[in-house]
Amino acid sequence: MGGQACVFYGAAEFSRDTDFALLADADNLERLNAALRELQASVIAVPPLSLEHLQRGHAVHFRCRHPDAAGLRVDVMSKMRGVAEFADLWERRTTLQGEDGTIYELMALPDLVQAKKTQRDKDWPMIRRLIEADRVACQGTPSSAQAQFWLREGRTPELLIELARQFHNEAEAMAARIRPLLKAALLGDEAGIEAGLAEEERAERATDQAYWEPLKKELERMRHA
């Protein structure tokens, strides 16, 4: 659900860790603990691993000591701001198979994009790259649903103007109901799009900050304890 997923989707990012979204229930926690023991992994920060902390939205951070994964950081979460429940994430996941037969279960691209709408500066350029990579990968005959996804999440004036021309009806409908800045895209107004994008990002950052504020206070209390 993090940088490694972005690599799979073609929006290459150097990542020093691996992030997982997981189902937080007792049986699955046992499976996770077994995997962590195999990796010789231990918690490196608060909070400790527990169903309660995962279900409240905290991330739990581990460092691996197994020789084949020495130093690798693993972060796990179960609940994320603005992102669907795990059952829905799993139902619409993307499944890939490597050349060696390894199966990789990725968060679906729309869910990954939503998860990237955070306070972190590095996440916003990644959203742009994810959408642009998907656009390149689907150059042939994209469906209306695919076009609507790009129109909803695209983050450059050039792309949005191009999409508004190619998918005029979808852009008009979405401008009225979902994404007002598409009105500027329909007019070819780059400055208007830039202003709309900046406002969207500002609002998402503020919402993310408000979401994390009480969770950060909980972490501070744990550290002091």
Image: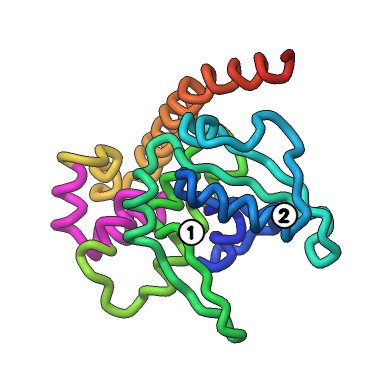
Tell me which amino acid carries mark 1: Leu
Residue at image position (36%, 75%) is 139
Residue at image position (59%, 52%) is 32
Which secondary structure lies at badge 1?
A: helix
Which secondary structure lies at badge 2?
A: helix
Q: Is residue 162 magenta?
A: yes
Q: Which mark is residue 130?
A: 1
Looking at the picture, tell me which residue is in the foreground, 133 or 168: 133
Is residue 52 something that shows in the picture?
yes
Looking at the picture, tell me which residue is in the foreground, 211 or 202: 211
Residue at image position (24%, 50%) is 186
Q: Is residue 181 above or below residue 138?
A: above
Q: Which residues, given as a range, are shown in magenta? A: 147-175
Within 10 Å of the Cα at label 2, are there few (<14), some (14-19), or many (20+) other Cα atoms? some
| Residue 130 in the image, given as x and y percentages of width and height | 48, 59
Give the distance between the C-alpha atoms of the residues marked 1 and 2, in whole angstroms. Answer: 34 Å
Q: Which mark is residue 37?
A: 2
Tell me which amino acid carries mark 2: Arg
| Residue 101 in the image, given as x and y percentages of width and height | 56, 83
Left or right position of 77 against 73: left
Q: Quadrant of residue 60?
A: top right
Q: Is residue 2 magenta?
A: no
Q: Quadrant of residue 138?
A: bottom left
Is residue 156 something that shows in the picture?
no
